[in-house]
Structures are given as structure tokens and as C-alpha cells.
Amino acid sequence: MIGTKLSRDGNTPPQAILQSTAGQQTYIVSIGENLDAETEIVSIEGKQVVLSTNGQQRTLHLPSGF
């Protein structure tokens, strides 16, 4: 995970900036969007993103100091 973008006014959905490890591609995604056929964005908070891959959830965290 590279970062998150949260709305200050509440009108824009939160976004996460993610980078793949395999293809070195960068994605900007919102809650409910899919990264691929199996992976959906479940939640986005200030320093973490929750993904669901084939029904299994995992949490990505920003490194300390961000």
C-alpha cells in the first residue's frame, strides 16, 4: 500500500493507492471496487485498507512514520 486519500467534506469516497508486487502496477481504488477477479476493496481508513480475496479478508497497513 502506498497511501490513502480521505475526503474532508464527506462528498468524495475514500481512495487507496496500491501497488502490485508482481507487475509493479499502481491502482487507485475505492470501496467496493475490484483489483482483480477475486479481490475486492472492503474498507479504507487513514492508515489501512481491508481487502477480501475469495472470501478471506486481509488488512494492509501503511508503514510506521507515514
Image: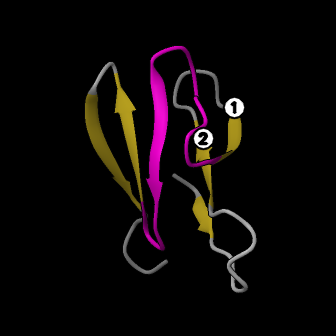
| Residue 52 in the image: above or below residue 62 | above
| Residue 18 in the image: above or below residue 16 | above
Residue 29 lies, in percent from the top left, at: 66, 45
The reply to whether the C-beta atoms of the residues labelled 1 and 2 are less than 8 Å apart is yes
Q: Residue furthest front?
A: 11
Residue assigned mark 1: 25
Q: Residues within 10 Å of mark 1 (few under 14, many from 20)?
A: few
**Front-lying residue, 3 or 36:** 36
Which contiguous range is marked in magenta? 30-48
| Residue 45 in the image: above or below residue 50 | below
Residue 47 lies, in percent from the top left, at: 44, 70
Q: Amino acid at mark 2?
A: Gln
- Is 19 on the left-hand or right-hand side of 1? right
Residue 41 inside the magenta-drawn segment:
yes
Residue 22 inside the magenta-drawn segment:
no
Q: What residue is drawn where x is 58% and y is 56%?
A: 2
**Front-lying residue, 62 or 11:** 11
The secondary structure type at the circle numbered 2 is strand
Marking on residue 19? 2
Q: What residue is drawn where x is 37% and y is 75%?
A: 64
Q: Residue furthest top?
A: 37
Q: Amino acid at mark 1?
A: Gln
